[in-house]
Image (cartoon, rainbow, N blue to C red):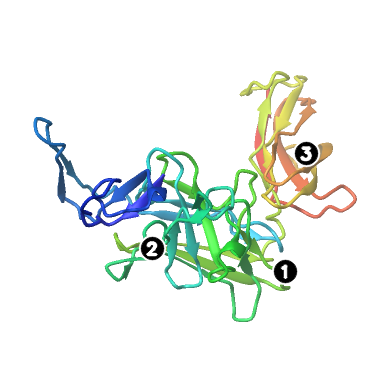
Amino acid sequence: MQMIRAPKSPMSGATLGNNGLGDIQHWPFIQTFEMAAGDQMGIAYGAGAPDIVVTYNDPAGDSTFEFDRESYPRDSDVRMTIRDMQLNVDPTSEDLWTFDVDGSGEIYRRLFDGMGNLVKTDKEDIDPGQIYHYGAINGAKVYDMVLVSGPPGTDAIRTVDNSLQDSTQVPTIAGSLVTVRETAANSGIFENTDRLGAANLRTGSDDGILEFKAGYYDQGRYTGAFAGGMLGGDSLQRARISDPGLVDASGGKLGAISAGQQVLITSTISGYAGLDQTFTFLLKIQDKDGATVHLGWLAGRLAGAQEFEPALSWTPPAPGTYTATVFLWESIESPTALSSPKSIEITAT
């Protein structure tokens, strides 16, 4: 469904209603109005029908904007999330917004149809001035997103196309577009990944440690949110691993355990979209004196943002206090850490 900004003048003799739109391709649509907190609008349906009064209240809470991690490998996806109910214009479907992140402050609603195609009806482009250009209201920026790709002349982060957008269809603004899609109708949560998990932001390939940042501004409420990342800053950010836990053979969580009781030590590991990664999950158990009493490992492969819950068995040989530490390495032969190790203390009675 399309969105029409600002009320249109009545059109004498119109066959499509009296809102001044003479093109049937614009229908059906949602009509938007500029309102401030506390404003009221009356809707009259004619003789005998009750009038409806709508009071506008500004949604509570500021907008938020974040990247999925702090440090990135080269040539990897950068996933971001915006939470802002003001972007939830159509509560009946998933809204899509496209930002021109070169600092111009331009934003477009449903510039693309969610599958990367420029919005068209009956093979004709919908009038962008009436439908999807949302760059300014009354001469002021409403929403803005700015992407800064590190120091001048460096390639720390860049925009790319995914199935949410095809920038070649809009060459006048191509190369600086970021399209976000609402995760569900009426959620107010927007992400820059398509349904296959591919993002439209990627880190560059330059050597060294390069910082990049982005800002999202909601000028209507004078709020801003900022996110930043680092390219090549931390080699441990190639995968994630959770704190380990104890479970039984059926996956049930365990509390107290006894010497001679076989338990499974498990953790959740996950990768990042756009980065396939081989891994070795290694378990080391030490007694209270720091002596290693057990080593075990298993190997596998994470495809993109896939999650996996490896588990390794262990039997406490005697009562006492033990420390279980889990590591995530590339392999036993190449023990490069993919994430920081995590530990728990275990007491066997």
For this orientation, the residue located farthest to the right is 333
Quadrant of the drawing holding the N terminus = top left
Which mark lies nearer to you, 2 or 1? 2
Image location of residue 24, percent across then percent down: 38, 48
For this orientation, the residue located farthest to the front is 13
For this orientation, the residue located farthest to the bottom is 152
Q: Which mark is residue 129?
A: 2
Q: Name the residue under label 3.
A: 283
Distance CA(mark 3)–CA(mark 2): 60 Å
Image location of residue 35, percent across then percent down: 21, 54
Quadrant of the drawing holding the C terminus = top right
Along the line of sight, the residue nearer the viewer: 60 or 20: 20
Which mark lies nearer to you, 3 or 1? 1
Q: In this view, does 224 lie above or below 334?
A: below
User: Could you tell whether 208 is left or right of 255 in the image?
Assistant: right
Crowdedness near tag 2: few (<14), some (14–19) or many (≥20) residues, C-alpha within 10 Å:
few
Mark 1: which secondary structure? loop
Name the kind of residue labelled 3 in the image: Leu
Which mark lies nearer to you, 3 or 2? 2
Q: Mark 1 points at which residue?
A: 205
Q: Which of marks 3 and 2 is nearer the N terminus?
A: 2
User: Could you tell whether 280 is left or right of 42 in the image?
Assistant: right
Name the kind of residue labelled 1 in the image: Ser
Name the kind of residue labelled 2 in the image: Gly
Q: Earlier in the sequence, mark 3 or mark 1?
A: 1
Residue appearing at x 46%, y 43% in the figure: 94
Along the line of sight, the residue nearer the viewer: 227 or 121: 121
